[in-house]
Image: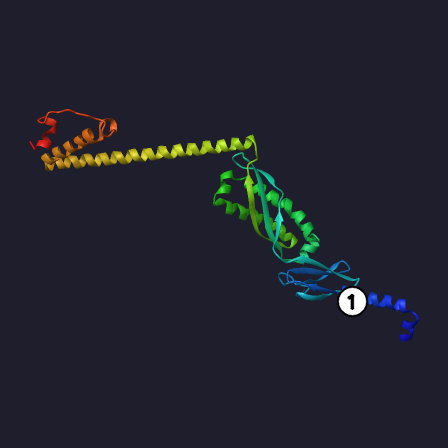
Amino acid sequence: MTALIKRHPMASLFVGFFLLVTILSSIHFVDETEQGIKVRFGKPVATINKYRPDDPFGDEGAGVAFRLPFAEELVMIDKRVRDLDMEPQQVLSTDQLRLQVDAFARYRIVDPLRLYVAAGSLENFEQAVEPVLGSQLRNELGKRPFASLLSPEREGVMENIRAGLDRVAGQYGAEIIDVRIKKADLPDGTPLQSAYQRMRTAREQEARSIRAQGAKQAQIIRAQADAEAARTYAASFGKDPDFYDFYRAMQSYQSTFVDGEDGDKGATSIVLSPDNEYLKEFTGN
C-alpha cells in the first residue's frame, strides 16, 4: 500500500479527499427546531425529530443523523410555528361595503411525512394554502356586516376561518394555530366617504329611536307619579283640609315667585297689597 501511494501520490490524494468528502456528507446535525424525512432513492424511509413522534417508520431525535451517501437525502422542515401572510383581499360585507382585508395565519408542521408526500416543501405548501385562506376569509366575512369586525363577534369569525383552513392544512400534515386580521379598511376615495355617511345616518337613526323610547318611558313614569301624587293629595285633603290648602299654596308660591313664568327663574315681578287673599298663608289668616 505504501509503495502504491509512493508510485501514485496524486491519485492517492484524490481518493483520500473523495473519501473524506463522502464521510462528511453522510453526517448531518439536526437542530431542535428542525424535523425532516430521510429519503432513499426517492422513497421516504424514516422521520427525524418529528413534532409528534408517532411515525410508523420510527423517529430519530435531534442531534447527529447519518445518511447513505449517494443513496439517501435528508429533507429538513422547520419545526417551529410559522406565519403565512395573505395578499390583501377585497371582501363585500352584507351591508354592501367593500373592505380591503389584510390577514395572516400561524401554523406548524406536525406530520413531515405527509407534507413531503403532498407538497414536497414548505414553499409549495404555503403556495397551495394561501388561496384557501383568502377564500375562507371572503366567504366568512361576506356573511356579516362591517360592524361585526369591530365587536366581540370578530373572535367567532376568526375561529370559523381557522377551523375551515385547518381542515385543508391537515391534508398537508400542518396544523393551523390561529388566524388574525391585521387590518380591515374601506377603500380610499368617494366610496369611503359614502360608507362613513351611511354609517353616520344609521347611528343617528338609532339614537333618535333610543331617545324616543326614553321619552315614552319618561311620560309613563311622570303619568304614574302624577296619579300617585293626586291620590296622595286626595287622601291628605280628606284627613286634614287645612294642611292640604297650605301645601297647595306653597306649591303655587314656588311656581309664581321662584320658578317664574314659563320656567324662567326670577323672570316675574308681581305687585300685590299685603292683605291680598293670595298671600293669606304669609299673614297667617
Q: Residue at x 49, y 41 (%)?
A: 148
Kindly give the residue lying farthest to the bottom in the view shown: 2
Type of amino acid under label 1: Ile
Q: Position of residue 133 (x, y in %)?
A: 61, 45
The quarter of the picture where residue 189 lies is top right
Q: In the image, is 244 to the left or to the right of 5?
A: left
Describe the element under mark 1 as helix, strand or loop. helix
Q: Position of residue 205 (x, y in %)?
A: 42, 32
The quarter of the picture where residue 87 lies is top right
Kindly identify which residue carries mark 1: 23
Q: Residue at x 13, y 37 (%)?
A: 236
Q: Vertically, is 83 above or below 208?
A: below
Q: Vertically, is 176 above or below 202?
A: below
Q: In this orientation, which residue lies closer to the viewer: 224 or 105?
A: 105
Q: Residue at x 60, y 40 (%)?
A: 89
Quadrant showing the N terminus = bottom right
Kindly give the residue lying farthest to the right in the view shown: 7
Q: How is the image coloured?
A: rainbow
Q: In the image, is 247 to the left or to the right of 20?
A: left
Q: Position of residue 173 (x, y in %)?
A: 64, 55
Q: How many marks?
A: 1
Q: Position of residue 197 (x, y in %)?
A: 49, 31
